Amino acid sequence: MTPDEWKRQWASQQTFHIPRYIFDANTEEDVLSNVREILNRHHLFINNYQTATRKTFQGFAMSLHRDYYQFNTLLFKKGIRDESLLWLKIYDGPSPQITAIWYLTSQGDDFNGGNLVFHDGEKVVPMKYRVILFDSNDLHCVHSQGKTRTSRDIMLFTYNVDRIKL
């Protein structure tokens, strides 16, 4: 079994806070408003969130991963399959539970490649003002970005949520 096969098997056994959602938003406030509405439907509310703007260029890619964690391929190659050892947290502080990516540039118009692809094969093509909202543990990768006229620009939102007590 390859590391990516193990990761996909791991992901297929997870229970996520929310399914994936795709919507359009013209402003940062639109993103937040839509996210709040979606999370409310799942009896979740935002207790804090962070944003970061990122620009990527030709050759950028990300392997199959979950947010805030890195997969320890060396331990995997040694035969270790304990998920608490294979997933290494790479940032301090609480790990986000929900992620939103808001595309500020479009594939085809501004750059080539750069698709977001989930472990089950669902592909999101970057289009300006498109937002993808998903559980931060939902494994995903970014395909290699080809020749670009400009950068692939995104605003990344990471949310920590609590369940609404009914």
Image (spheres, rainbow, N blue to C red):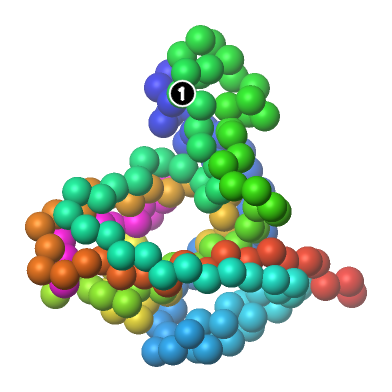
Residue 81 appears left or right of 52: right
- Residue 62 x %, y %: 35, 46
Q: Residue at x 58, y 87 (%)?
A: 33
Residue at point 63%, 70% (across, down): 49
Magenta stretch contains residue 120: yes
Q: In which quarter of the image is the N terminus?
A: top left
Compare residues 113 and 54 and report the one nearer the observer: 54
How many numbered discs?
1
| Residue 155 in sight from this viewpoint | yes
Q: In this view, does 107 lie to the left or right of 28?
A: left
Left or right: 28, with 150 as reference point: right
Percent x, y of residue 146: 14, 54
163 shown above or below 94:
below
Q: In the rendering, at what x and y percent does residue 130 appear?
A: 36, 77
Identify whether 5 is placed above or below 98: above
Which residue position is annotated with label 1? Answer: 73
Residue furthest right in the image: 166
Identify whether 147 is placed above or below 49: above
Q: Which amino acid does label 1 sit on?
A: Thr
Q: Residue furthest front?
A: 92
Q: What stretch is highlighted in magenta?
A: 110-122
Residue 19 figure quarter: bottom right
Residue in view at x 51 percent, y 10 percent: 78
**Residue in the picture at 57% in, 55% down:** 136
Rendered position, 104 above or below 65: below
**Front in this rendered view, residue 6 or 161:** 161
Comparing 56 with 86, the one in front is: 56
Let me know if residue 42 appears in the view: no
Is residue 38 on the magenta stretch?
no
